[in-house]
Image (spheres, helix red, strand yellow):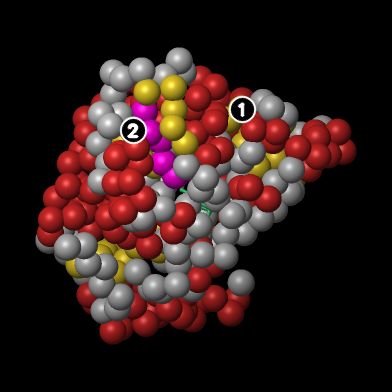
């Protein structure tokens, strides 16, 4: 950790000079999350914070769709992402054209897209949802059938919680799909741990756990339950970051890191502030339509 300190000092100095705000997703490494971030949260929390904060220069430490969502909600601000390599297997599983083809196949059926999609896909959608509000948003469409994109596992979980018929896509989170039911059982039996999983995990994993919830919902569950031991079946940095907040809880493995989140590093955050790179751009018409889908979600509740 000592090797991080010169970078953290340099970034925090340059950040002040530039009047910039650094935002970090919960899946960012602890030296970023605790060392340089002014705002932390889940993907939509960050986008809303970008729209609400006073700064005109914001560095989003997260993956590309998160920086895009910030730009959609704050179109007049400069939104930087430190690495253009920070993608997402869910966001890249579907294109705007795929959504148009689905609509043609299911005329009149509304489209709800997960936040983990490109701005172009959001623009083709009626409403956006997060893992925290997916059931609520699907039901708000007041249709007996809804096209739900692109995460098949999240879709199957939502389908288990509602009577609405869902048309699903075959997108997967390459991180959460790796967890197995056997790992979950092992954590429970070997470490006597309570189990919490993100709904991007497979149905077999979700069947094993005490609680299924989004990034933010997991934090609230920990506050409520205060377990002696817990296995967070989600991206591994989340447990690293929460450890400081819950000193009485022991966090046990399994661990999977998101390779895309790991593209963001202290050196490239520094370079982002120094060279003002890489500004995220969303074409005005796409931004406008994607913004309407996002606002529809925000009006219903996060
Ligand atoms: P959140 O929307 O909860 O921030 O999750 C984003 C993500 O990438 C989950 O894998
Ligand atoms: Fe995408 Fe999965 Fe990484 Fe989240 S953890 S950014 S859903 S690949």
Q: Is mark 1 within 8 Å of ligand 1?
A: no
Label 2–label 1 contact, CB within 8 A: no
Residue 39 appearing in the image: no
On the rendered structure, is 176 left or right of 154? right
| 255 relative to 279, above or below | above
Q: Image check: 112 left or right of 17?
A: right
Q: Who's the residue at 49% across and 27% down the image?
A: 158
The nearer-to-camera label among 2 and 1 is 2
* Residue 30 drawn above or below residue 82: above
State whether residue 144 appears in this view: yes
- Location of mark 1 (residue): 211
161 to the left or right of 68: right
Measured as percent of width and height from the top left, residue 295 is found at 20, 38
| Residue at the front extreme of this rendering | 105
Displayed quadrant of residue 81: bottom left
Q: Which residue is mark 2?
A: 106
Residue span colored magenta: 146-151
In the image shown, does 267 or 261 lie closer to the viewer? Answer: 261
Residue drawn at x 30%, y 75% as measured from the top left: 278
Classed neighbour count for the residue bearing mark 1: other residues with Cα under 10 Å, few (<14), some (14–19), many (≥20): some
State the SS at label 1: strand
The answer to which of 193 and 226 lies nearer the viewer is: 193
Viewport quadrant of the N terminus:
bottom right
In magenta stretch: residue 147: yes
The first of marks 2 and 1 along the sequence is 2
């Amino acid at each position: 950790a000592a090797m991080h300190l010169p970078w953290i000092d340099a970034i925090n100095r340059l950040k002040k000079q530039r009047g910039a705000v650094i935002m970090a997703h919960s899946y960012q490494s602890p030296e970023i999350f605790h060392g340089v971030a002014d705002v932390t949260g889940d993907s939509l929390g960050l986008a809303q914070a970008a729209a609400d904060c006073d700064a005109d220069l914001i560095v989003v430490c997260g993956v590309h769709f998160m920086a895009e969502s910030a730009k959609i909600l704050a179109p007049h601000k400069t939104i930087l992402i430190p690495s253009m390599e920070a993608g997402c297997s869910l966001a890249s599983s579907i294109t705007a054209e795929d959504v148009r083809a689905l609509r043609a196949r299911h005329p009149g059926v509304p489209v709800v897209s997960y936040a983990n999609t490109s701005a172009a896909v959001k623009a083709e959608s009626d409403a956006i949802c997060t893992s925290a509000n997916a059931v609520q948003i699907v039901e708000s469409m007041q249709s007996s059938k809804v096209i739900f994109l692109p995460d098949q596992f999240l879709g199957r979980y939502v389908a288990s919680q509602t009577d609405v018929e869902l048309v699903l896509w075959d997108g997967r989170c390459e991180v959460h799909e790796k967890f197995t039911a056997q790992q979950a059982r092992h954590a429970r039996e070997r470490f006597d741990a309570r189990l919490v999983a993100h709904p991007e995990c497979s149905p077999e994993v979700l069947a094993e756990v005490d609680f299924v919830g989004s990034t933010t919902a997991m934090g609230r569950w920990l506050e409520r339950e205060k377990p002696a031991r817990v296995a967070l079946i989600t991206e591994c940095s989340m447990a690293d970051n929460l450890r400081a907040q819950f000193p009485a809880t022991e966090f046990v493995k399994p661990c999977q890191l998101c390779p895309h989140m790991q593209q963001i590093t202290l050196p490239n955050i520094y370079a982002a502030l120094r060279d003002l790179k890489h500004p995220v751009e969303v074409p005005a018409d796409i931004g406008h339509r994607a913004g309407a889908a996002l606002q529809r979600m925000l009006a219903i509740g996060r």
